[in-house]
Image (tube, rainbow, N blue to C red):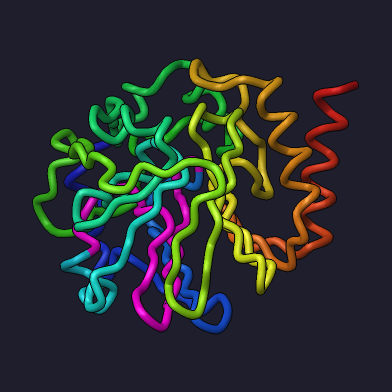
Amino acid sequence: MANEQDLPVRGAWFERREAARGISWILEPSVHGFLRSNIWHVSGRDRDLVVDTGMGITSLRSSLPDLFERDPIAFVTHGHYDHTGGAYEFSRRAGHVEESGMLSEPEEATLMTAELPASFAEAMAADEPGGVCPDFLVDALPYAGYDLASYGIRPAPLTDPLVDGEVIDLGDRVLEVIHLPGHTPGSAALFDHASGALFTGDVLYDGELLDELPESCIDDYLKSMKRLLALDVSLAYPGHEQPLSRDDVQRLGSAYMEQRLS
């Protein structure tokens, strides 16, 4: 096994890009693609919104202090740790009420691939050159001396447990909670009807959609995908990979349904 202290130190752990007017895309480039999730910062007239909060390997607040200048609401699309790691740093934490348990009592988290379920490690290995799974889920450290074994997820109970149809109002942007169970029971998207922007979490992205986890339900996923495809989406901001055009959304969603219904 490789020695974690042989990993380089990454000077800036987070990378930020402009995705659209008032929407920033924040990434953790040194996290393995298997768990590298997207963080979306939405600027509003009255307050800001952060959709998903990354792995929590190092502090968002310390790394990107301007992100917190207007006391943003954090919305977690679901409770998996690659999306909730930094949630504890926000004073207001919103998400679907059915994910409350995963935020209050987080799942066990690790950066050591040897501690992952065998099915996860096999899936990772399949994407690696030579079919060999890496020892760590990161290829760098956030600072010298960081102990990968100490990594864990802090409890971050929802302050704003929401249900389908409730909204988050930023002043000039209103986003509706769309409950889309399947990946997890409380998976939820945020939809801006005015602009057609949809924040999908892990319900839809350009990659293998995970619907066979212990907490997943394929029947629910199919119903959710049908509902998602009926939305008038102009651009989707997913939990992983690149933003999706209207055509991408229809193509990927239809492909999932065809695969599961065939």
Q: Residue furthest left?
A: 145
Q: Residue 249: percent from the left, percent from the top?
A: 76, 54
Q: Is residue 42 magenta?
A: yes
- Residue 97 placement, left or right of 214: left
Q: Residue 68: percent from the left, percent from the top?
A: 24, 72
Residue nearest the observer in this picture, 51 or 174: 174
Mark yes or no: residue 242 visible.
no
Residue nearest the observer in this picture, 9 or 83: 83
- Residue 52 placement, left or right of 142: right
Rendered residue at 54%/48% (across/down): 201
Against 72, residue 45 (above or below) is below
Q: Residue 200: percent from the left, percent from the top?
A: 59, 51
Q: Residue 102: percent from the left, percent from the top?
A: 33, 30
Against 132, residue 5 (above or below) is below
Instruction: Please identify the quadrant where the N terminus is shown.
Output: top left
Mark yes or no: residue 224 visible.
yes
Against 116, residue 88 (above or below) is below
Rendered residue at 35%/50% (across/down): 94
Rendered residue at 39%/53% (across/down): 75
Q: Main secondary structure of the magenta part?
A: loop
- What range is drawn magenta here? 34-60
Residue nearest the observer in this picture, 92 or 251: 92
Residue 43: quadrant of the picture: bottom left
Residue 157: quadrant of the picture: top left
Rendered residue at 78%/43% (across/down): 253
Instruction: Please identify the quadrant where the C terminus is shown.
Output: top right
